Image (cartoon, grey):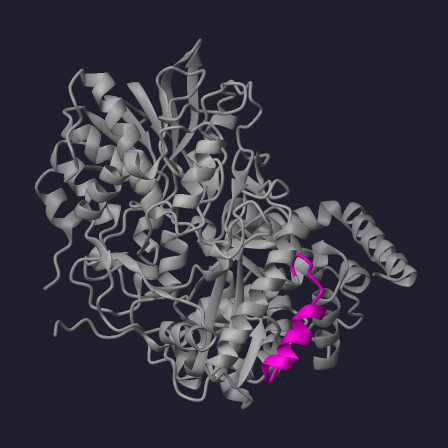
Amino acid sequence: MPTRRQFIKTGIAGGLLLAAAAVFQKQLDRMGKQALVAGNPLDPSLRTVVLAVAPVILRGSFPTADADRAAALERITRGVALAVGALSAASQKEVTELFALLALAPTRIAVAGVSASWDQASVADVEGFLRRWQDSRVDLLKSGYQALHDLVLGAWYADPQTWAAIGYPGPPALVQS
Amino acid sequence: MIKDPYQEGIARGWKVVDAARLDTDREDEADVVIVGSGAGGGVSAEILAKSGLRVIVVEEGPLRSTSDFHMRESEAYPALYQESAARKTADKGINILQGRCVGGSTTVNWTSSFRTPPGTLKFWQGLGLADYTQEALLPWFEMVERRLSISPWAVPPNANNEILRTGASKLGIETQIMRRNVNGCWNLGYCGTGCPTNAKQSMLVTTLPAALELGATIYYGLRAERLDLAGDKVTALECVALDAAGIHPQARRVRLRAKHFVLAGGAIGSPALLLRSAAPDPSAQLGRRTFLHPTLVSSALMDAAVDGHAGAPQSLYSDHFLDNLPIDGPLGYKLEAPPLHPVLFATTLQGFGEGHAALMKQFTHAQVLLALLRDGFNAASRGGEVRLREDGTPVLDYPLDDVIWDGARRALLSMAEIQFAAGAKKVYAVHEECSGWDNWAQAKEGIARLPMKALSMRVVSAHVMGGCAMGVDPGRAVVDPRGRHHQLGNLTVADGSLFPTSIGANPQQSVYGIVARNISALAQSLTGKPAAPMA
């Protein structure tokens, strides 16, 4: 059973989320709309967030050498943007709102609990944020974590360049026996 | 060279219209307009066309056929699946894999074919569906088996399936060989991304080409928006063209008139169209009691390579845990194995970072089992409800409650025990708080303690059923036992939304057989002559 303290924390987090969403509604809307026009990797909210969270979600399979890292960041950002662009209109709206909420400083601090800007955030900051949302008692935050999980991991393993590392040979050649 | 029936057919004059390329609004007319081109729509199209009726089929998804199927998840999910294979229930607790393309889910399913189980039919007879007996349906199941080459899989199962049999037999649990709708299957393992060899006898390569050959028209990339109603009649279907990506509606509209309308948009799409049309609903059952076979996932690590990406995806199953419980008791479950491909596997697995990466590095040694819960029979298992979003698109609200979680916990225990019996080094319930167990004793204790909560416990579904339940009483059912709408005289529902419960088995053949009987009755009532058989 949840403890009283957990209930209070849930209440605060849920309340903050609603308050933040109300206060910043206009700005979030505008950011969301910009993103929707694009569905593109240059959408600043998506880019800011993916550049910070992807290497942490993918730690253990993400390249460590600087040059490879830069190229991988570019690929994963494009991959996530493509994946978002393929979602239904309703899901695209939700996901772009999620990226906008995470990219905007006040909501990033209040809802994601990350005080440094994403480009300054440490691995521990990002990991802490992902773990809090993963374990959150607020379904909205938990589903936000799931969305980041699915988009980043889905885009990464859709890329044939990642297959050798997991031993997947790729689709077989269509040769009639 | 593998032939592409659509390239050849279109060159010969098949009437296949890409709505995204219409440059004016359009009106069209036929004897019957069919909404949806999946299992129900495909069978309907063939029977009605062969019976001499003029048919138009409307499909929201794109046309992709043989030469487009490259066995790549990155191409298949956005093009062939509802919501890019990421369709979610309202609280996002269940991920639904459902087709959205010409051929519907039959284009992307894993070919598993079952006649409706006798226990399910018996339960339905208790609900008043008196002629839903094994004997009455047998000729229809046999007819679709002939037509779609449904037969027991004669090739040795791949290792991912074989491990189900190995572990189960050690525990005295019976497994059976799957029946599949394939003809000359290459045993590649890519049924889920569209069959590149035409072996899968989906609607895409069987019934729809037969209907097109007889002059039927298919509009694709066209969303059925609303039925126009006048009294107890449907007068027209109002449609809107989608953009080339198939996501956003465009300005072009198509209005289709017909004597009769057949709804086969699937168990989310069909109720949604009736809801958008404000169809009469005196039973208050429209869009209610939608079932999913909520499915749990257990992943194991084996010593030897499993290569779950290769070979027929589903070739063995066990009904042991369906048969050992009363159908309306605690939820029973069917055990099966899924195909393993990188995107589906990576997104389904819990966790992130090094833990996730370590599991992915063992991709070729992973063995996965599925348990499909038989929902809708126990009085407490009421399924979900289809609702409309602001933009008119549907969302299924399916609360994960105690009756489901009780079944989920038992299912995870059964799967882990089988996997350890087959020699697994480690077993993982796909749950955010599970970091794996080294032996059966640990798993037993760990599963007993797993908190059963939506979004922590991963639940998936590939079977959507119900929402336009059939029944004799207009006060309690949306359509009659032949699928005819109780209030709208010229409307028939012909897909999985008819089912008053889940099926308790992969539902494609239930749709084929039941729709074949119902639509044959419709053809006879429209032409005054017996319907033409499919085979």
Quarter that holds the C terminus of chain B = top left
Single out the residue that lies furthest toward the bottom. Answer: A65
The quadrant holding residue B253 is top left
B182 sits left or right of B509 in the view: left
Asked whether the viewer can see residue B20, the reply is no
Single out the residue that lies furthest toward the left. Answer: B12
Residue name at image x 29 percent, y 45 percent: B102
Residue B157 lies in magenta, yes or no?
Answer: no
Asked whether the viewer can see residue A68, the reply is yes
Residue B438 lies in magenta, yes or no?
Answer: yes
Q: Give the percent coordinates (x, y) of residue B167.
A: 45, 76
Residue name at image x 20 percent, y 68 percent: B186
Residue name at image x 48 percent, y 23 percent: B277
Q: Give the percent coordinates (x, y) of residue B242.
A: 39, 39
Say if A138 sits above or below B223 in the image: below
**Which stretch is magenta?**
B435-455
From the viewer's side, name the closer residue of B13 and B432: B432
From the viewer's side, name the closer residue of B23 and B532: B532
Say if B374 sits above or below A49 in the image: above
